[in-house]
Image (tube, helix red, strand yellow):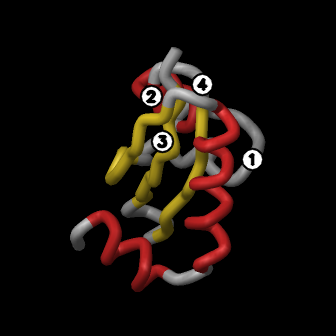
Amino acid sequence: MKYYTYILFSEELNKYYVGSTRDEIQERLRRHNSNHKGFTGGIGDWEIKYFEIFDELPKTRKRELQIKKWKSRIMIEKLIGV
């Protein structure tokens, strides 16, 4: 099974979102772009800008938390090559 840590970007919000999933990444993106409650819901323009694949869920979650702890747009953009 594959696990993903990913970074999304919304032009409308001009913001990044960092997450992880055990689902296929395109399916997870579809759910982020659906009309649901939560930070990513109702926007509909989220795009995958970056992802990493892991073979274990704990490694995936650890990487997600590492990126979130940066709290730095500059570090995220450096990672994704913007």
The residue that disc 2 covers is 25
Quadrant hosting residue 11: bottom left
Q: Distance between the Cα atoms at labels 3 and 1?
A: 12 Å
77 or 31: nearer the eye? 77
Quadrant in the rendering for residue 41: top right
Residue 38, numbered circle = 1
Q: Earlier in the sequence, mark 1 or mark 4?
A: 4
Q: Amino acid at mark 4?
A: Arg
Q: Amino acid at mark 1?
A: Gly
43 horizontally vs 26: left or right? right
**Above/below status of 27 relative to 29:** above
Q: Quadrant of residue 66?
A: bottom right
Q: Residue furthest top?
A: 1
Q: Which residue is mark 3?
A: 44
Q: CA distance from mark 4 to mark 2?
A: 8 Å
Q: Marks 3 and 4: CB-CB under 8 Å? A: no
Residue that protrudes farthest toward the left in the picture: 81
Q: Where is residue 25 drawn, in percent x and y? A: 44, 28
**Badge count:** 4
- Of residues 11 and 69, the one drawn nearer to the viewer in this rendering: 69
| Mark toward the start of the polypeptide (2 vs 3) | 2
Residue in the image at 45% along x and 53% along y: 7
Q: CB atoms at circles 2 and 3 under 8 Å apart? A: no
- Name the spot of residue 47 as percent of width and height, x first: 36, 46
> Where does label 4 land, which residue?
22
Amino acid type shown at disc 3: Gly
Residue 75 lies, with reference to residue 8, above or below; the image says below
Q: Secondary structure at mark 3?
A: loop
Residues packed near mark 4 inside 10 Å, few (<14), some (14 to 19) or many (20 plus): some
- Badge 3, how many Cα within 10 Å: few under 14, some, many 20+? some
Tell which tag, 1 or 4, sits nearer the viewer: 4
Residue at the spot 33% in from the left edge and 52% down from the top edge: 49
